[in-house]
Image (cartoon, rainbow, N blue to C red):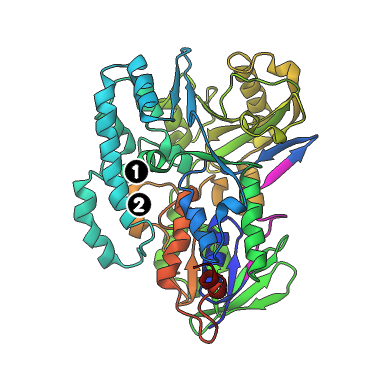
Amino acid sequence: MNRVIVVGGGFGGMAAALRARARGYQVTLIDRCPRLGGRAQVFERDGFRHDAGPTVLTAPFLFQELFALFGRKLEDAVKLVPMEPWYRFEFSDGQRFDYGGSMAQTLAEIKRICPEDVAGYQRLLEDSRRLYDVGFTELSDAPFHSAGFMFKQVPHLARLGAWRTVWQMVSRRLRSEHLRQAFSIQPLLVGGNPFDTTSIYGLIHFLEQAHGVHFAMGGTGALVDAMQALMEDQGIEIELNTTVEQLTVSAGKVTGVVLADGSSRTCDALISNVDPAHLYQNMLPSESSRVSARLKARHSKKSMGLFVLFFGTDRQYPDVAHHTIWMGPRYRELLADIFNRKVLAEDFSIYLHRPTATDPSFAPAGCDSFYALVPVPNLEADIDWEVEGPRLQERVVKALAGTILPGLEQHLRADFFMTPEDFATDYLSPQGAGFSIAPIFRQSAWFRFHNKGEGPSNLYLVGAGTHPGAGLPGVLCSAKVLDRLLPDPVSQSRRPATAAMVAQT
């Protein structure tokens, strides 16, 4: 077994391709988008550049590991700079909270808002550390396709209170409603409702504290370009603008793929970075997959959808932070509208990305580049986005103009937006979900889509819908899981860069 096809060029697919190549496989990566990155596409309009996908970079060591596989250094390919603050919260009553930087700065900000919560925050951080030590350090790259392995973890997870939600975890320690909101939004970064998401995902808080929040100069697209250059240098074949329609299966193994143009490719093993629900429902013959996979694909609860407004301004807003969380007047009720009632409310909250706060190259001189991301119901809701898209755009612009971006209507340039319908069309995301399946307890660990395919013996899965979950650290760790699952190639050298690595030691 020598040739691997990777379907899907998101960060999980790229990391898996690199790890397979480092093991000695011949690797071909196929993606339907015009450039690699999956949802991390790059859009340019009238001199304004926008990262369309993830913009919060944590756990940079996971990227460093990929370059080190070939004796390279990440910092030689792309420059990462730490953010300060990590996030700025703008609340509807005018209160502001800057989170990130040194611990002294964080504690001072908490004390300014609610002195009684300083001690509570320190206990919350310790709760998060314990979750991190188990959920990330021990289990994030462990295969969870065995029910026996899962059952062995139950006592540890119970002891850590994994049955609690993130909101319950935070509310046990903090009194301030503003701080409760600020420290419970992490599940939204991976597609979950803090009131439903298992507190396992509370580890994200310590992950940020342990490794910081960074930005890649040139944007996430520059990080994608650096990974593509590394792949090409190591002989990985890349086919873009190419859609895989079906997997071919014979005698319980994937033997290749059929492309949209009718042509085919053969392989000895296949790694899917496709949304697992789409994979099992549309790409793999039903007789070739297990009932467990088909049931999960059909009945899994999907994450929320995303409305993303991209725009530039012909002036700068120097008082706006790189990462701003603009909170609407409602929190629990708004999230219930999005995740449970599936209605598009009149109010909303916004993640506002202003990369020009750090990297002026994202806009013409004297201008700013932005995107405003609004969580919305996925396509299970009865929403006509041809009508509601322009309406929501108008409301978002008006809300920002009335608060942190004064005069925005007059200074708006080159604006356009994406809705859940675009996610379904462009990324083949079932129900237009922004982050694949939701990170609730019954869809975590063994209950999530397995990294070992539930069907053909040589099928492997990576990406947001698989263990350990969505977000850059999650999808990169899903590729690390494959190091424990993918067998050695039959007749190739173990690692193509071994000589180079030896020369450096």
Q: Secondary structure at mark 1?
A: helix
Q: CA distance from mark 1 to mark 2?
A: 8 Å
Against 353, is 274 above or below?
Answer: below
Q: Tell me what residue is drawn at x 24 percent, y 30 percent.
A: 172
The quadrant holding residue 28 is: bottom right
Image coordinates for residue 304, horizontal then vertical, percent: 50, 41
Which residues lie in the magenta part? Answer: 28-43
Prevailing secondary structure of the magenta residues: loop
Residue 335: x and y in percent read: 44, 31
Q: Residues within 10 Å of mark 1 (few under 14, many from 20)?
A: many
Disc 2 target residue: 136
Can you say whether 74 is above or below 407 in the image? below
Tell me the tag on residue 64.
none
Tell me if 482 is positioned left or right of 125 in this view.
right
What's under tag 2, amino acid-wise? Answer: Phe
Q: Position of residue 442 (x, y in %)?
A: 34, 51
Residue underneath mark 1 = 203
Give yes or no for residue 33 being in the magenta stretch: yes
Q: Amino acid at mark 1?
A: Leu
Q: Earlier in the sequence, mark 1 or mark 2?
A: 2
Q: Are marks 1 and 2 in contact (CB under 8 Å)?
A: yes
Judge left or right: residue 489 versus residue 248: left
Against 489, residue 20 (above or below) is above
Image spot of residue 138 (x, y percent): 31, 57
Tell me, yes or no, if residue 383 can be seen here: no
Q: Is residue 214 magenta?
A: no
State the residue in front, 497 or 453: 497
Q: What residue occupies the far bottom of the structure in this picture?
A: 491
Name which residue lies at 63% across and 62% down. 230
Residue beneath the point at 51% across and 81% down: 489
Give the total number of marks visible in the rendering: 2
